[in-house]
Image (cartoon, rainbow, N blue to C red):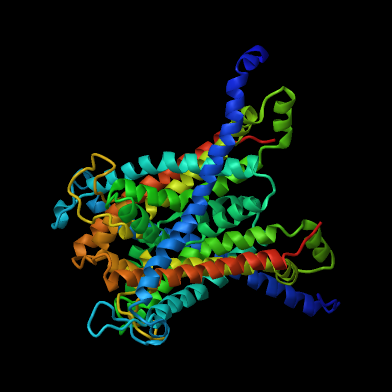
Amino acid sequence: MAIRDIENKPKVNILETIIPKILFLFALISILTTVGIVFILLFETLSFFREVSFIDFITDPKWTPLFIPKHFGVLPLLSGTLIVTFIASLIAIPIGLGSAIYLSEYAPDRVRAIIKPILEILAGIPTIVYGYFALTFVTPVLRFIFPDMDIFNALSAGIVVGIMIIPMISSLSEDAMLAVPNSIRAAAYGLGSTKFEVATKVIVPAALSGIVSSFVLALSRAIGETMIVTIAAGGTPKLTLNPLESIQTMTAYIVQVSLGDTPQGSIEYKTIFAVGMSLFVLTLIMNLIAQYITKKYREEYQ
Amino acid sequence: MIRHNGNIKDIEKRRKKNMFYFSLFLFATLFGVITLAVLLVDVFIKGIPWLDWQFLNSFPSRFPERAGIKSAFYGTLWMLGLTAPIAFILGVGTALYLNEYAGDTKLKQILQININNLAGVPSIVYGLLGLGVFVRGFALGRSLIAGSLTMVLLILPIIVVASQEALKSVPSSQRNASYALGATKWQTIRRVVIPAALPNILTGTILALSRAIGETAPLIMIGALTFVAFVPGSPMDSFTVLPIQIFNWTSRPQEDFQYIAAAGIIVLLVVLLSMNGLAIYLRNKYQNKY
């Protein structure tokens, strides 16, 4: 071994200097990805704003770039995205947090060993399958309750987007709660607390930064979700608060345009990059907020 | 914070409250399980009657009874084959650089923050990137390779983070033992660190790939076709994949296509479950405990 290594010395030295450089180039790809995203979005978005004023984009209450008269107000798409995200959070936050508390504070190891993999499967279901489920199962069930509801509607899509992000909230919040040291639990039990009191008055406050950041991350995922809303929420951009109506989200609009035959360089083509840019900025801000919360408000235990 | 009160009634009230919330939390947990069951049963009931050899071995058609999934299935296999090696090499390489070579510098911090942020970028934005860079910029057109490269960028952050976790779990005692025997840094990484971390790296990579298999939106952006009546023969060919085909069937008005879509979903889920099964098998079989 030793003799062989000495014989190989020159080759070994070359490897020792060249490998880190190659690996560094690989690492640069991720930087290039970010640069690429920003550059592509910015380039087309700037060219979009040469034809449409930014004020119109953020104040015009109509979004009809594919018809005449053309309007380029992003508000209807934004309200569509926000209404779906709001419904999703009503479903996912209580259920995700409840299940995280159960898994971290109540569940015996045996039960955890069964339920965790099931939640992992739920997290791995492709969004196209959730979209199918929303349109062919949830919508008919909801129309039974609200007979006047549109076939495509924000409620069904919002509920299913909520179901999609439950595992994310549940597992990230559970991680945060499990990180609270057992000595703190034991102290609270020693004072005679019930499990519920330990969970809600000690563990959840101690893990709050992780829990809140899991909410923010999950909502950012809901904002960027595409297939469920494309299939189930409809294609009619509308400034409405009624969840029973057909709406259109930012992501669904981008899909609608790319399914059609839109020539490169046309204003319709540029709109998808302007909408994509808005989406990118919105989710980036939320992800940064989540990271900030985890960093700034983390309770440190020794 | 917790009131001390010897009153028996009060204790009973607290116990009841505890039991009430216990059932509520349990129900929240079971909600996910029940939803998964309902979803699977719904899809299987609708799809199983349509799932036969004719379906697996036919190309798409305007007529539901003749429609099949062959081109989409082969498209997915092609994409898996092109995406896996590139994403694996780039992802593991990046993780090795960050964990083993990069000092605690500003540059490393920037790389790390950048990767964390990329993991949160919506997949449809990657589609816009692929459209701008691969389809138009590199003039690859609406080809398999353009789709696969887009998928590589999409799953790269997942593979990097998983590989970093795997590398971190190799204890420094193992590295030090290798150095003590006179091994160089790269020899230690290649012969000690990578073999020890490989099962977890592979698990992470397979899970990331199964994410790529299920993605629809970015491939719609780069223009994967919805009607492909041939099996792709080279990376430059146009293509379709399972989720795109399912989307196409789901959005048709005729009811029969809803059942065809369900049959397609069963095929997709079987592919995904076998990949996840492989990942779990690797994790359990080769897991090193230090």
Front one among A60 and A157: A60
Q: Is residue B160 visible?
A: yes
Front one among B168 and A10: A10
- Which quadrant of the figure contains the N terminus of chain B? bottom right
Report the residue at 56% width, 66% height from top: A287
Report the residue at 32% width, 48% height from top: B267
The part of the image, by quadrant, that contains residue A260 is bottom left
- Which quadrant of the figure contains the C terminus of chain B? top right
Left or right: B102, with B1 as reference point? left
A5 to A45, vertically: above or below? above
Front one among B4 and A124: A124
Q: Is residue A138 visible?
A: no
Where residue B15 appears, x then y in whole percent?
Answer: 73, 72
Left or right: A193, with B207 as reference point? right
Q: How many marks?
A: 0
Where residue B171 appears, x then y in whole percent?
Answer: 70, 37
The part of the image, by quadrant, that contains residue A257 is bottom left
